Structures are given as structure tokens and as C-alpha cells.
Amino acid sequence: MVEAGHCKPNVVTFSTLIKGFCMMGNNTAAMQLLRKMEERGCQPEPNVVAYSTIIHSLLKDTLYVDAMKLFSEMISRGIVADVVTYNSLIHGVCNVGQWKEATMLLNEMLSKGIFPDVPTFNVLVDKLCKEGMVVEAESVVEIMIQRGAEPNSITHNLLMDGYCLRGEMDEARHVFDLMVRKGPMVNVYSCNILINGYCKKKKIGEANKVFKEMRCRELVPNTVTFNTLIDGFCKAGRIREAEELFSEMQGCGQLPDVQTFSVLLQ
């Protein structure tokens, strides 16, 4: 129909096809369609949706350089990036370890009055924490708060894990207590992070204290909780308490796994 001249594809037609190719993982075909839009003088011209779709797909395939080139091309053509474009870029560059680029993109985004969503902030917080840059991660959280975005339990868990990775357990506990004061934000995952951090620092007493606090908060310890604490007791030479915890684990319906037996047999 197109070849016969019965209908002329517009930007919606091309954008839909581009999305389809990207969903199939065929970035080459998507790029060819984008170029065909330009060659045919498609009206209106390729828009932010078409570019953002391909940028997202390229980043999903960790093609960081290609994605950034396409982003630069988009800007040079006078197409204004939106929140979807920047969210995709920040997610993508974080996934390939380009946290400096991610921070620059965040600042650029904010300077243009475009505000990222909480999950995007969390991606950046996660990456910074894993790089040991918890102070910088805290700064990102401050920006969130200043802009009216409330950090959620994921945000706080990421910060707490970051402090635990650095062995800064007082700071990790401070984040945990902040979550407690904010209401029902603490979950089993939060407790597991703190218990693991204390065990790695050989502070088994503090780890056990968090474990006991879980009951008060009506949180049910899972297999990870028990495995972490059993391992902590074993490494501290407190074998009897590890065995008692193993019995408790079975008594409350949490099935031991390979890791449980591996810890007990070591």
C-alpha cells in the first residue's frame, strides 16, 4: 500500500514500527527506520518518542557509546529530551558502570526543570553505594527530598547496604532507625541487610538483637535471615546457638537450603 502510494506513513507509523523492532531486540532495523524517516522527509519529523525508544533499547543491550551518540544527535536536531529519555539514560549508564556520567545527566536533567522519578534516583543511589560512595549517595537523597520526592524503603535499604559494605555499622543503624521512625518502612530485607552487616563485622550480639526485634515488628524471618545468623554464630564459635537457631528455623516453617547445611558442616 505504501509503495503504491495509497497511504503515506507518518511519525506514528514509524514510531510504532521502531518500538516493535526494539522490543524484538533488533536495534539495527530500528535505526534503519529512523534514517528512512529522515530520508523521506516524514512530517512531523522524528520526535523524542522515536529517539528515546531506540536509546532505551541500545542501553538495554549495554551499547552505551551508540546510545550517547544518538542522544547527542537528538539534541543537535533541536529535539528536547524528556523525563523518559533521561530516565533511560541514567538507568543505562549506571548499568554499565558510568556513574559519573549518570550524575552529570541527573544535574543536567534538574537544570532543565525535568524531574526524575524515585526508581531512577534509586538506581543512582544503588550504583554510588556499590562504588563505596555513600556520602555522594546521601547527597542524591537530599536532592530527592528537596525536590519533594519521598525516599522509599528501597532507597533506605540501598543506603543501609552501602554503609554495611563499608563496615560503617553505626551509620547503617542510623538509617534503619530513621526507617522505623517514618512508620512501616522496615521489612525483612531491611533486617537481613543489617544482620548481615553486623555478622561481617563479627558483632553477632547486635545481629541477634536485630533478629529479636523482628518479632516485635511482626516480621517473619526468612531462610536468608536464618542462614546469615547461623553463619555468624558458627564463625563466632557459638555452635550451640547456631544449632538452636537451626531448630527454630525448622520450627517456624522455614526450610533449610543448601547454604544452611553448607554453613553447619563447615
Image (cartoon, helix red, strand yellow):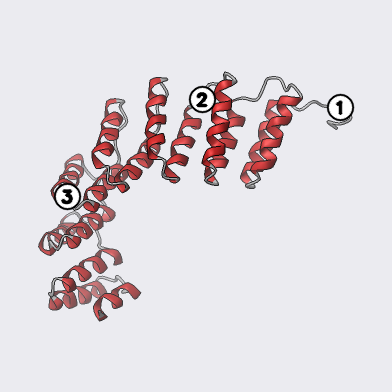
Q: Residues within 10 Å of mark 2 (few under 14, many from 20)?
A: some
Looking at the rendered image, the disc whose residue lies closer to the viewer, 1 or 2, is 2
Q: Which mark is residue 81?
A: 2
Left or right position of 191 against 9: left
At horizontal 27% and vertical 56% (from top left) the residue drawn is 188
Write down the residue under mark 3: 168
Give, as a three-letter code, the residue at label 3: Glu
Q: Nearer the viewer, mark 3 or mark 1?
A: 3
Label 1: which secondary element: loop
Of residues 105 and 123, the one nearer the viewer is 105
Residue at the left extreme, as displayed: 205
Quarter occupied by residue 112: top left
Instruction: Answer left or right for 251 relative to 116.
Output: left
At a point 85% along the width and 32% down the height, the residue shown is 1
Residue type at tag 2: Ala
Mark 3 to mark 2 CA distance (whole Å): 39 Å
Which residue is label 1 attached to? 6
Q: CA distance from mark 1 to mark 2?
A: 34 Å
Sooner in the amino-acid sequence: mark 1 or mark 2: 1
